[in-house]
Image (cartoon, rainbow, N blue to C red):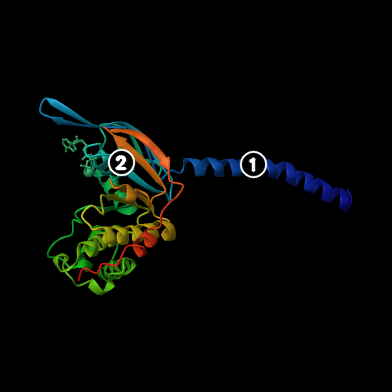
Amino acid sequence: MDNGQWAMSFGLRTTLYHSPFALYLSLTFTINIMANAILDIQHLKREFKMGSETVRALKGVSFDVQPGEFVTIMGSSGSGKTTLLNILGCLDQPTDGDYLLDGVNVKKLSRNELARLRNRKIGFVFQSYNLLARTSALENVELPLLYNSTISSQERKEKAMKALEAVKLADRMDHLPNQLSGGQQQRVAIARALVNEPVMILADEATGNLDTRTSYEIMSLIQELNTRQGKTIVFVTHEPDIAAFSSRTVTLKDGRVVKDSKNENVKSAKEALDSLPVNDDY
Ligand SMILES: Nc1ncnc2c1ncn2[C@@H]1O[C@H](COP(=O)(O)OP(=O)(O)OP(=O)(O)O)[C@@H](O)[C@H]1O
Ligand SMILES: [Mg+2]
């Protein structure tokens, strides 16, 4: 075989051996991308027994969320939003159906494994901030790290300070919750949710107690976490102007999904904030 023939044969063999492999790789890659939902819920049901009565809060809810999505969950009072979010945050278990968190079926985990998974993957933000009253902003943010014995107290402090910097509250780290405004308290709660570097933030009416300007400030921060850091966001709200900042809205009614739509025209919370009239009451 001369050099030319060898090169041809090598070229042919490379094509024969490598292209099915390339095809296999690209197929696996595609399947992986498609299968890699950060959360995937299938036929979720949640019933609450109240004496002889059964409240069916979720009646078979299915959808998935891809990494990096910003989804709002809407629906009127009692439609099942908090019930759903508590299950997504592993704070509650469904009566029936499956929940896969980053590919892991949470049903199959022990209590400890579940706690570890939740602590690592999820940051939770509540409507009422849930900060410890007699504890400084910094210590509140350090709290989730206390469960991790491999982190030294020095490291804990550094991580908490970094999280407070990310929500622009480094200068308030020694303040107690009652020495902070509502918006600042919610930012401390967001820093606490961020301190473990979770891939996903779950928020239940996180702007529910705040005025419009402060709500937009919080939403601007949430949008930044989503676009700059790629955090997946699932945000419960019943305010349409808040939902307009997300890229997709799932609507619940009586424990069922009645609408799941992409938002083609995502509004910028920062622009909405800048366009608010300046308050000249005082
Ligand atoms: N622990 C519980 N025990 C009994 N019933 C419950 C419990 N939690 C929720 N429910 C019922 O489940 C239904 C859904 O409640 P959920 O709190 O999920 O609604 P929601 O959409 O979050 O409402 P809201 O907008 O008012 O916060 C309601 O009918 C509620 O009364
Ligand atoms: Mg609720």
Residue hosting label 1: 23
Q: Residues within 10 Å of mark 2 (few under 14, many from 20)?
A: few
Q: Residues within 10 Å of mark 1 (few under 14, many from 20)?
A: few
Please state which amino acid type lies under the numbered disc 2: Leu
Residue hosting label 2: 109
Please state which amino acid type lies under the numbered disc 1: Leu
Q: Which of marks 2 and 1 precedes in the sequence?
A: 1
Report x, y in % for residue 249: 37, 43
Report x, y in % for residue 247: 42, 48
Quick check: 222 above or below 8?
below
Task: Name the outermost residue toward the left.
Answer: 51
Report x, y in % for residue 101: 36, 43
Element under disc 2: loop
Q: Quadrant of ligand 2?
A: top left
Could you tell me if residue 235 is visible in this image? yes
Residue nearer the viewer, 21 or 205: 205
